[in-house]
Image (tube, coloured by chain):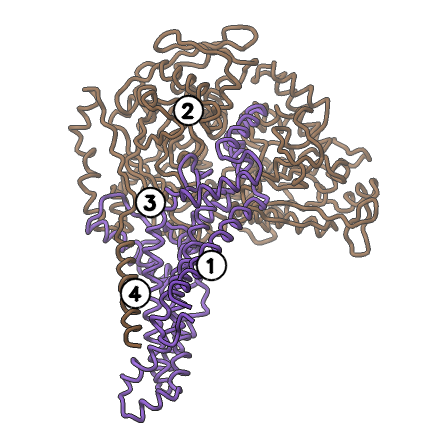
Amino acid sequence: MAKGFRSTRGLLVILFLLSVVACATPPVTEQVQAPVVSTPEAQAPEESTPEAQAPEESTPEAQASAPVAQQGTMTDVGTPRNQTVIFQTLDRKTATPDNHNPLMAAYALWRGFRELGWGYLWEMDTATGKSYPELAADMPEVLNDQHTQFRVKLRPGVYWSDGVEFTADDVIYTLDTYFAGKGKLTYFGVNTITNYVKSYKKVDNYTFEVETVSPAYDFATVMGVYTWGSAFNIVPKHIFEKEADLAAFLNTKPVTLGPYVVKEYDTNGFWQLWERREDWQRAAWGADNEPKPKYVLYKDLGPEETRVLAFVQNQYDVDTFMSPDSIKAAIAKNDAITTFSAKLPYHEMSDACGYGVLMNQHKAPLDKKEVRWALALSLNLQDVGINALSGEFKASPLPMVDTRILRPIYFEPLLPWLKEFKLDDGYQPFNANFATDLTNRLTEMGIDPAQLPQGDEAISNAFGLGWWKHDPAQAEKLLGSVGMKKGADGFYTLPDGTPWELELVLPGDWNKVMQRMGFSIADSWRAAGIKVNARQVDNAEFGNVQNTNASLTTVLNWTNCIYNPNYRNAWRSIQAENLKDANATEPISGNPYRWNNPEVFELVNASVQMDQSSEEFYETGRSIIKAFVTDMAYLNIMNIPTTVPTNSTYWTNWPKEDNFYALPYPWWSSAKKVVQNIEPTGR
Amino acid sequence: MGLVQYIGRRLVTYVLVLFIGISITFFLPRFMPNDPIEGYIAQMQSQAGQTLSPEAVDQLRESLSDLYGLKGSLFSQYVGYLERVFLRFDFGPSFGAFPRPVSDLIFIALPWTIGLLVTTTLVSWTLGNLIGIVAGYFHNKRAATALEVFGILLYPIPYYILALTLILLLAYTWPIFPLSTTIRPGTLSFNQLGMILYNSALPALTLVLAGFGWNILSMKSLAFATKEEPYVTFARLKGTTDWTRMTSYVFRNAMLPQITALVLSLGTIFNGALLTEMLFSYPGLGLLMRTAVGTADYNLLYGTITMSIIAVATAGLVLDLVYPLFDPRIRYR
């Protein structure tokens, strides 16, 4: 017995020592130094600017005084809080914190590379939806009538962060690399660009020419930026050409074109710190308006439960996709926290993509437009918006988001048509008073009138131009017209008398807003007599359902990503050749609506030959929209309610409704405007 | 049965368990309705504003399928997988972090999981058992009852609630600890160690409190029953002190099932502590596994689950081999 006990003690000691060793073992770490600037001009400020050395000097103190960081003097990563703007990361944690190679899909793209590190030929002005030159000196010059040949002039005087000048050689090298690396480089842009570009050549150090495969009226947005990212990530030739295997190259000390460089990152993927370049005036952007924060920290502050606490403690400045409930809780505790607008729906609603229900039109009974319309008319969107989103949403009946950019071109011209639009039986489904009705309901619910929009225009801007009527009786009539009647249990049956059970796939807790919406939609349909099986899935299954006919009945998803008047990116794949059999198990490559409408195929084909800023192009788009509505090919619901609350304790002048200079999103080109326009409070 | 035969049989069982476990691990994710490639393509379609043309989608699908090793029949993939795992202990590249090997991701997360969970498991086991033996042996005393009540109160609190309560108290109301983990890179130094301990303290405290209630209650029950054994009565009649009987007679015998529980607990630490990692933004295997499931990263799933299978099977093997050392009544026959 005694011997056994001694063995036990020995075992315990060994385990304890193991644990201490494990605990004390440092993580695999790597500290990225600010790249050394090689030109004399650039070296000078680095050597002489005291601020440049401050973070390094203060590091030990910062480490030792981590608890003090919450009091507002230093951040947890050792930078002065009043020189550091802190964004909550969009993806919380990245699995690849040390991969900074933009030619690979799995690089740490949500850590600010797109916003602060890379530079693009043309960027997107999120306030207007117009492209503007960034690395290019101007918009592309069209060289032929077919709109397939372009000349691009680059802006001289742009330098990589290591002091090497950016030239056409970098562009040509990147194009060469895309074509040579096809099949090995996993970044989606490699496939996009190699299918788009036919040939290219350097003209001189600041000029190159490109020929595209097809007429390319969208040249500036495909080679530059359309919505979030760019297919064409230009890489530094002088760095990448030294690597034998670019697929394995991590680029952990990235040389950047933007005015920031990676200073430090968490090898576990929870945060990344950027530092403004000493020569930021020579970067791809920022020379006209100095980026204000010396440091930008992307950091995961935890799940919403702890993020709210951190937000109240002023530990960070901008959150993303925080739920309305959490935002209210934070605002109640800290006056410095505000939403985009003081009035409902409180948030900016201009994300390019919208929420809607994708219906598999190949599968009975969804192959009948009467059934699809019945689903639309059975949905009580006011209930859904109030229950799932506290009324903080903007409805859109058309298959695109209702934004300040798209409304004058597509929504307003189509409003008279919507009001007059009739189903085959003469029923008029459009409710132009949707926003006013919603406002009245919110008033009855006791919402402070000061927080509600006043006047028709403000109400329409806030909650949308209208949506479909909630009319279960008309839905019953439509379903009855195709042989679907309610059974004894109050739920509809199929024409053969068997119960109709509709599957609605929705995201699990990886997208809580959609999860809540999905359950609320299912409740609404059930109340109208449609038996719904609402099934939550993980994101990998979600993509599978979306793209596979055999798996899809209906899915609540985000699609139709249209930011400026060019709708082709979203709709160009509406073609017969992208349709597959109703129960096909191989994934589709386009036409996610499973929509078989030859007239629309022709309209989509015709649009490729049109100038995308022409009235002809817009009118073609309106015709496609009318066909979408007539067939109810996609049940569009609302703009994505993008919640971006900000904290003005350390930084002010955030983009707000009454101070609108860009979208408030810290993850898009708007982030560039944000860091240029915010001001320190001096705390 | 001799010692060699005993060890031989246990080793054969061990290998068999590993083979079956690893085989199941291969097939289970394949039967999930997830698809790593479609998941990625759907993400890209939304991020890229659907600039991916149908032709580009087809090509991307083809090249990813090739790079991820998802071409060929399921059987040929299975054979390749067994060969890689058993002969080279190689799980291939992670799909989500391609082309980074799965082993890299695991070995980055592993020290954090081991450091946190081994420490907290041992602390909660030791504290719980010490309190439990006192509560069980002196079960008539008020102080012992109070200790038991403490265990009863603590044990049923869901971990999530317990952790949030501690966060509210110790990181918000009295901000002694950080709300989320921030470990800066650097070489091992006192500062670095201090930073790790400072950031790990609150997660560790929640795990210890969540774990040791069970240890108190189980040890208390065992001690109470053991105390009534004839050999303890005999020792009391011989005039031994309470301390001697509690430590040498009751505790040592009551501890045997607790050792089994401890070893198995240590075996399961390779599953990570998902809730802890999520709540505190703490690195570890739990989040790695969660990500792998969500994105259908088969190889990463194989790697993490296989580690867990090996750990649990090894814990069982070690227990089988060393148990006779703890309990002389057990022999190899």
- Spot occupied by residue A584 in the image (x, y as percentages of width and height): 68, 35
What residue does disc 4 label? Answer: A11
Identity, as a three-letter code, of the amino acid under mark 2: Asn
**Residue B217 figure quarter:** bottom left
Q: Is residue A41 left or right of residue B237?
A: left
Given this view, does label 2 or label 4 mark the residue nearer the observer?
Answer: 4
**Which color is chain B depicted in?**
purple
**Residue A282 figure quarter:** top left
Identity, as a three-letter code, of the amino acid under mark 3: Thr
What residue does disc 3 label? Answer: A649
Q: Which chain is brown?
A: A
Element at badge 1?
A: helix
Badge 4 crowding class, 10 Å Cα cut-off, few under 14, some 14 to 19, many 20 or more, is: few
Quadrant assignment for the C terminus of chain A: top left
Q: Is residue B140 left or right of residue B196?
A: right
Spatial separation of the CA atoms under disc 2 and disc 1? 54 Å
What residue does disc 2 label? Answer: A233
